Image (cartoon, rainbow, N blue to C red):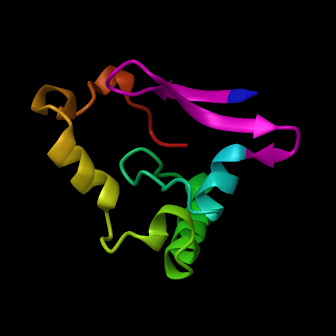
Amino acid sequence: MVDEKGEDHLGRTEGIVHIHQTTVNEQMIRSGMAWVDPLRCRTGECDPWKHQEVAARITKKGLWEAVQSENPQFEWHKKNVPPAEQAAPPAQKTYPGY
């Protein structure tokens, strides 16, 4: 099940994915296979995920094994995504975090 939270600036659905009693987003962050987007995930519901990301970074799990930067996803995005796609999402497509 996907608890839809809105769309990003490219029209892709954003949300929280649940399989039975497991939150897939959380498991991916905990294992170092994902990070928390600080621009989109700004409510208290995200706080545990932020701590789990820090733990994954410290223990160098998943993508953090090879990453030296604090914000590698944003650096990669700036270098590899065309400027037109880097624009901030329109106000009506954003949501107050989840």
| Looking at the image, residue 12 lies above or below residue 70 | above
Q: Is residue 13 part of the magenta span, yes or no?
A: yes
Measured as percent of width and height from the top left, residue 4 is found at 60, 26
Q: Residue at x 70, y 45 (%)?
A: 24
Q: Nearer the viewer, residue 1 or 45?
A: 1
Please, which residue is most extreme toward the right here?
A: 20
Please report the bounds of the magenta region as a residue range: 3-23
Residue 10 among those drawn in magenta: yes
**Residue nearest the viewer, comparing 35 with 48:** 35
- The residue at 44%/22% (across/down) is 12
81 with respect to 22 (left or right)? left
Give coordinates of residue 19: x percent, y percent.
81, 37
Please identify the quadrant where the N terminus is shown: top right
- Residue at the image point whose x is 41% and y is 70% from the top: 66
The chief SS type of the magenta part is strand
Q: Position of residue 34 (x, y in %)?
A: 52, 53
Instruction: Tell me if 23 is positioned left or right of 75 in this view.
Output: right
Q: Position of residue 35 (x, y in %)?
A: 48, 56
The quadrant in which residue 83 appears is top left
95 horizontally vs 3: left or right: left
Q: What residue do we see at 58% from left, 33% from top? A: 15
Above or below, 6 relative to 70 = above
Q: Is residue 92 above or below residue 3?
A: above
Tell me if 91 is positioned left or right of 25 in this view: left
Q: Residue 88 is drawn in which quadrant? A: top left
- Name the quarter where the C terminus is drawn: top right
- Total number of numbered labels? 0
Q: Residue furthest front?
A: 66
